[in-house]
Structures are given as structure tokens and as C-alpha cells.
Amino acid sequence: MVESDKLRVLVLGDSRSFHIERYLPELRRQNCEVLLASLEAGRIEYFQLKWRGPIRQLHYRLAVPELRELLSNFKPDIVDAHFASGYGHLAALALEGMSTPLMVHLWGSDILIVPKKSFLHKMKTVKALKNADAIVADSEYLLNEARKLAPLKQTLVSPFGIERKYLELHKKSYEFSHPLKIIIPRPHEEVYNNLFVLKSLSPLLKAGQITLTFPDFGTLNIEFKFQYRALNVSGVSFYRQCEREEFLKLMSVHDVYLSASRSDSSPVSMIESMALGLVPAAAKIPGIEEWAKDSGALTFEQDNSTELVAVINRIISEGDSLGVMRTNNLERVRKDALYENNIAARVDLMRQLVNR
């Protein structure tokens, strides 16, 4: 029998997602009874919503009757939908005429990219935003972009952040490696612009001043490898998808975190790098400004190879003088981006909505 103070949460999201995988056990640790429902087939325990029909864009709408049946059987206190234009829209449709509150998590691309695809995509996102009793975003920037699409009710800014235990991996010494070890931990996708990084920094690779570590996955992985071999440079390594602790340990042995992403909200990987003591470097886009400000990161203009090379040369030349940045970043993470604290804020918000 469920304890009376436990919160029954129906989470809607992609069961393959790393964020969903670590979100569910933390909700349970914080006294929630959780059921995940997903259209995608992941490796964690979840309720499988059936794909219906050959048209992918209709799968969410066609899942409404099945979701309504699940709502009737599970009887959640609240529905927590992740990604506005997909599961947020599905939840908004399924909850019509019901009193169960809806909280929608924004993931960045559902606000920054999807609504621009077509009028239909925009309308799906707008319906989710209008029907949500609360919106959670990882940056004020993302909330402001969502407000341009629809009026929002209650809101919460809360980055996912990093678990407290991993702060132990923060560097004991800020002395740089020789050559400088740079990690680019974003999959090979068009939006992350990894090939730009490789081509821009190839002279520094040839000079033996740096090494680069990239993921060995992403839809453009094969093309990236082809371009890499054509450059005929050494000092580049690749890592396969791995468990969270293994990945954070891998990141922690590098000196610099680098992202040339063309679109982002508050990037989890950059916050993780700040917690571990790396020097963050990123392309100037609105989504990273809240963490890059006050010298939190070194930035360069988007797609500007000269500026990127100058940033890396500055890191090499300034060395230990960047220690203040790194200690300040750690304190910022302690204050604003500890995972357990930020999930607790979400749970508090859910309880407020339920108890209205």
C-alpha cells in the first residue's frame, strides 16, 4: 500500500533518454511513486505506449486513448511531461476534462527549434504550454523564449546539474597537461558543429599542442570519421557511450571542455565540466550566457575559427592563472546546480500544484 505522503507521478518521456534514466530514481528517492510511460523502447522499466499508424507525427495524438486508460488505472497525483511539442502535447490532449495537474519540462530544442519547423509543430508546442499548470526550464533564457509562444502560468528555473557525490572528482591540481587535453562531449549531430572544431584546431593538433576527445556516436559519426581521416592528423581519440560515473571520470582527466553548439539552453555537460574543474570554452549563443557570464567560461563567435584558436592559445598561455575561474565555477555549481537540490525543487512544485 502506498504511503499517504507519497506523491504519485506519471512521467511521460523518452525511455531511451539519459536524463530520464537518472531522473526517475531520484524522484523515487525523494518519496515519489513513479511510473514512466513512453512511446520509445528504452532499457529501463516503463509502460510502453503503442505506436499506431505509419505516420510518425501522429503517434503522439493516436496514443491519447491509451494514455487516458493509463491515467484511469494509475490515478497519478500529477503528470510530468518531458519535451513540450511531443509528450507535453500528448498530455494536454489526454488530460482534457480532467483535474489532474500537468507539469511540463522544456528541453531546449522543443522551444528553440521545433516550433520553427512548421505551423503544426508550433501549434503543438503552444497547446502544451497553454495547458501546463507549471513549466520547468533549465534557464531563464529558455523560459523567455517559451513566453514568446504562449502565456505561462507557474514557472521554475532549475538546471539538471550534477550529483553531489561527483564533486569529489573536482581537480586536486589545476596544472595543465602537455599537450592540453580537450574534450568535446557532444554527439556528432549537425547542431553540435563538431567538424568545425576539428578543422579549426587541426593546426594545433599537428603542432602537438593539444589533444581532442570526441564521442564515438551520433548520426554524423561516420561522416565525421571520414573527414578526420582526410585531415591526416594525430592526437584525436573517441569514446563510446558509457555509464554516467565512467563518463564523468573520463571528463575529469581533461583540461578543457569545448562546445561549438549552434543551439543550447543550459548545457548539462558544461555545468558538469565546471563542477569537475575543467576550463569551459563555448560558442557565443544565448543559451550559455547565464553560465558563461562573470568569467564562468571563455567564449568565441559562432563558426569563427580564428576566435576559437585564440581562446585555446589563451588557455595554453595563461595556464594556472585560470584557477580563480575554476574555483568560482565550483562554488556556482554548489549553489545553483546540485542535482539533488534541483530535483527537490521540482518535487516541491509538484506538491504545490497537487495541494491547490
Image: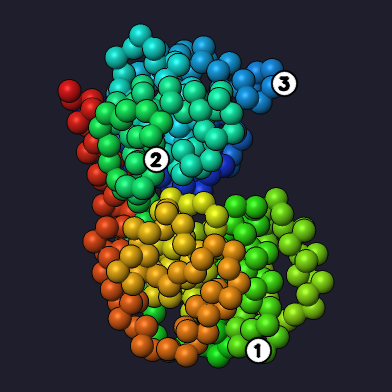
* Residue in view at x 34 percent, y 83 percent: 323
Tell me, for residue 145, which label it has, or none: 2
Colouring of the image: rainbow
Callout 3 crowding tier (Cα within 10 Å): few <14, some 14–19, many ≥20:
few
Residue 174 picture quarter = bottom left
Front residue of this view, candidates 23 and 276: 276
Q: Is residue 148 above or below residue 322?
A: above
Q: Amino acid at mark 2?
A: Glu
Comparing labels 2 and 3, the label whose residue is closer to the camera: 2
Per the image, the residue denoted by label 1 is 208
Per the image, the residue denoted by label 3 is 54
Using the numbered discs, state the Cα–Cα distance from disc 2 to disc 3 in whole angstroms.
32 Å
| Horizontal arrangement in the rendering, residue 227 relative to residue 162 (left or right) | right
Q: Is residue 245 visible?
A: no
Evaluate if marks 2 and 3 touch, with contact meaning CB atoms under 8 Å apart: no
Q: Secondary structure at mark 2?
A: helix
| Horizontal arrangement in the rendering, residue 232 relative to residue 137 (left or right) | right
Using the numbered discs, state the Cα–Cα distance from disc 2 to disc 1 in whole angstroms.
42 Å
**Quadrant location of the C terminus?**
top left
Residue 347 picture quarter = top left
Q: Secondary structure at mark 1?
A: loop
* Residue in view at x 39 percent, y 79 percent: 171
Q: Secondary structure at mark 3?
A: loop
**Quadrant location of the N terminus?**
top left
* Residue in view at x 35 percent, y 61 percent: 291
Comparing labels 2 and 1, the label whose residue is closer to the camera: 2
